[in-house]
Image (cartoon, rainbow, N blue to C red):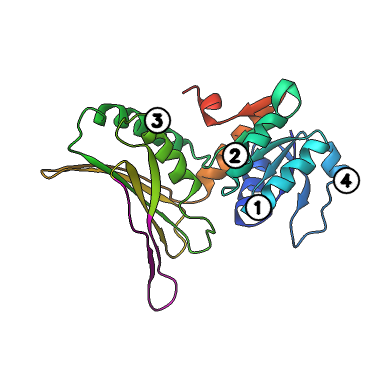
Amino acid sequence: MKIALIGYGKMGKTIEEIALSRGHEITEKIDINLPGSYDSEGFKAADVVIEFTTPKSAFGNYQKCFERGKAVVSGTTGWLEHLPEVKTACQDGKNTFFYSSNYSLGVNIFAEINRQLAKLMNKFGEYAPAMTETHHIHKLDAPSGTAISLAEGIIDNMDRIDGWKLDRTIFTAGDKPTEVANENIAADQLPITSLRTGEVPGIHTIKYDSADDFIEITHSAKSRRGLAFGVVLAAEFTLGKKGFFTMKDMLGF
């Protein structure tokens, strides 16, 4: 498989390493610090484009890929206001797009456990759900895309939860932590706390708290490799397919 990379930071380099180890070829790299081009011979030769950039540039990157008939696998978060447009672009076999807020196999198994737990806890109103997510200080969006996806898994399966709200964001960069707290969390909203500290790859914890006890589940990433491996598997999955896909399609959940 021939792959073009848009975004060649730490994640892009890890994706390249894993793709090469699985016998694939990187034919083009486009990044702010690289001279790559959407109209190069390497980009034209690519079977699939893997995109990991920033929320501001992601949708424009997708459009450029669609204009050139390229399948896209993206892990950029923070752009979902354009999701309906991307899905429309993939209708009627016109384009191919694979999206996940987190490509880790472990996280996606965790997400399925989260959905099943929410269904069970729907019967027990004395337990209040809440979420905490922790990432490195370079992450631009809060809450994380993975946290939002997990929140949707709870909202879809609990009658008493109708939405989510960012409860507080805590940055520990520098000598003194900075905390931004939000008020007026309604009883039917899932509160999410976002922590930004060090170089943490990603930790997501969901807690159901009652007066007598609590139930807590956590997924903790050890490195970017689990994400990158899932991205390459997703790229392999898109070959010969048209439409909009997620990890549920690939994993069969």
Q: Which residues are magenta?
A: 167-186
Q: CA distance from mark 3 to mark 4?
A: 42 Å
Mark 1 / mark 3, whichever is N-terminal: 1
**Residue 235 can be seen in this image:** no
Q: CA distance from mark 2 to mark 3?
A: 26 Å
Q: Which residue is mark 3?
A: 156
Callouts 4 and 2 close, C-beta under 8 Å: no
Mark 4 / mark 2, whichever is N-terminal: 4
Query: Is residue 180 a member of the stretch shown in magenta?
Result: yes
Residue type at numbered disc 1: Thr
Q: Is residue 166 left or right of residue 122?
A: right
Mark 2 / mark 3, whichever is N-terminal: 3
Callouts 2 and 3 close, C-beta under 8 Å: no
Q: Which residue is mark 2?
A: 231
Crowding near pointer 3: few (<14 within 10 Å), some, many (20+)?
Answer: some
Q: Name the residue at 47% across, 62% down.
A: 199
Q: Which residue is mark 4?
A: 39
Q: Which residue is mark 1?
A: 53
Residue type at numbered disc 3: Asp
Q: CA distance from mark 1 to mark 4?
A: 19 Å
